Amino acid sequence: MAKHHVNTTINGDPVEFLCDTEQTLLDCLRDELGLTGSKEGCSSGDCGACSVTVDGRLVCSCLVLGIEADGCEIGTIEGVANGDELHPLQKHFLKEAALQCGICTPGFIVAAKSMLALNPDPSESEMRYWLAGNLCRCTGYDKIIKAVTNAAAEMRGE
């Protein structure tokens, strides 16, 4: 089977990789590029653990083919922090204990960052709606909403 050559940008860096026709973007990120932050939870787009952005749009990377990333700008959990400095979302997830097993955490953070880029001051209802595609089996959602609320306030300078 022929491999496809993909040129893309991931977290601001130009990246090239080879992938099979049927390989998902999630598999390419994890297996071809060693970016293991995005998790495989369901393989059907139902859990949000594999959330990334493609050209600024939030997607489940298990539903996108790797070859579809050609020419796109991809954002993953690995690109959220600024070097060693955690993003406010990451800091508040830790501070509010909004994680336990950690499988869902990267997807929640990527989704929340995407939401805050579009709406820096969302209501709780808007947050819950936006994050509804991300499922957590361990923590419930109150701590996650509190972490996102506090991170949003910090990002607005409050």
Image: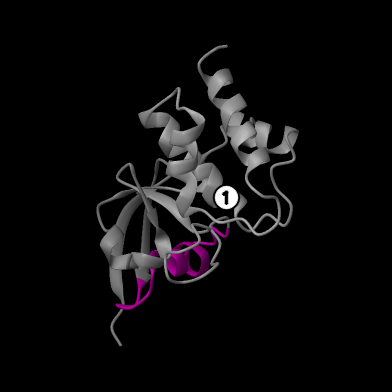
Q: Residue at x 52, y 65 (%)?
A: 30
Residue carrying label 1: 106
**Which quarter of the rendering shows the N terminus?**
bottom left
Residue 141 vertical placement versus 43 (above, below) = above
| Residue closest to the far bottom | 1
Image position of 55 (left or right of 92): left
Residue 11 vertical placement versus 102 (above, below) = above
Q: Residue at x 66, y 50 (%)?
A: 140
Residue 125's spot in the image, x, y percent?
Answer: 47, 35
Name the image colouring: one colour
Q: Amino acid at mark 1?
A: Pro
Q: Quadrant of residue 95?
A: top right
Residue 118's spot in the image, x, y percent?
Answer: 36, 30
| Residue closest to the far top | 158
**Which quarter of the rendering shows the C terminus?**
top right
Q: Using the rendered image of the protein, determine whether residue 18 is visible from the camera's viewpoint.
A: yes
